[in-house]
Image (tube, grey):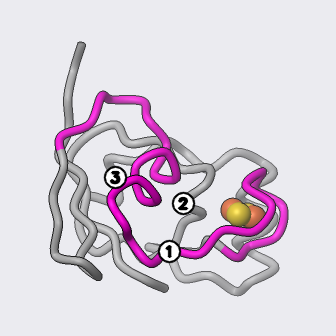
Amino acid sequence: MAKAKLTFSDIDTTVTVPVGVRVIEISEKIGSNIVYGCREGDCGTCLMKVEKGWENLSTPSIVEDKILRENAAGKHHRLACQAQVLGDITVSLA
Ligand code: FES
């Protein structure tokens, strides 16, 4: 199975994860401070900043895209409960 490096800069921690995993599946396990609400791409609570490797995340779904627009999110902001890791990335709190 392909692997990628996912770095949470808020806790200065890098983990090796299977490609395709969502950020939410890892961040709570290792104690990142990204906060979640609905966990379904509906509330925007889990907005995170992608510092490096933003091209290594899945394309936002229609649902995620709508929430990003409603939150006036920047180009490098994504929802941690929706974004799937496809390659090495570094994320931080929004
Ligand atoms: S937790 Fe609600 S959009 Fe991610």
Q: How many other residues sit within 10 Å of disc 2, few (<14), some (14-19) or many (≥20)? A: many
Q: Which residue is at the front of the view, 36 or 84?
A: 36
Using the image as rendered, state which of residue 82 and residue 13 is in the foreground: 13
Please give left or right for residue 62 compared with residue 10 in the image.
right
Q: Which residues are magenta?
A: 16-45
Quadrant of the image for the N terminus?
top left
Say what amino acid the circle numbered 3 marks. Answer: Glu
SS at circle 2? loop
Tell me the distance, in whole angstroms, between the alpha carbons under discs 1 and 3. Answer: 20 Å
Relative side of 73 to 69, left or right: left
Mark toward the start of the polypeptide (3 vs 2) = 3
32 is within the stretch colored magenta = yes
Residue hosting label 1 = 34
Q: Where does label 3 land, which residue?
A: 55
Residue that label 2 marks: 80
Q: Tag 2 or tag 1, which sits nearer the N-term?
A: 1
75 w.r.t. 62: above or below: below
Amino acid marked by disc 2: Ala
Residue at figure coordinates x 84%, y 61% from the top left: 42
Q: Secondary structure at mark 1?
A: loop
Amino acid carrying label 1: it is Ile
CB at mark 2 closer than 8 A to ligand 1? yes
Q: Quadrant of residue 30?
A: bottom left
Q: Nearer the viewer, residue 54 or 92?
A: 92
Does the magenta segment cover residue 34? yes
Above or below residue 12? Residue 66 is above
The answer to whether marks 1 and 2 mark residues whose Cβ atoms lie closer than 8 Å is yes
Q: Residue at x 44, y 73 (%)?
A: 76
Q: Quadrant of ligand 1?
A: bottom right
Which of discs 1 and 2 lies nearer the camera? The answer is 1
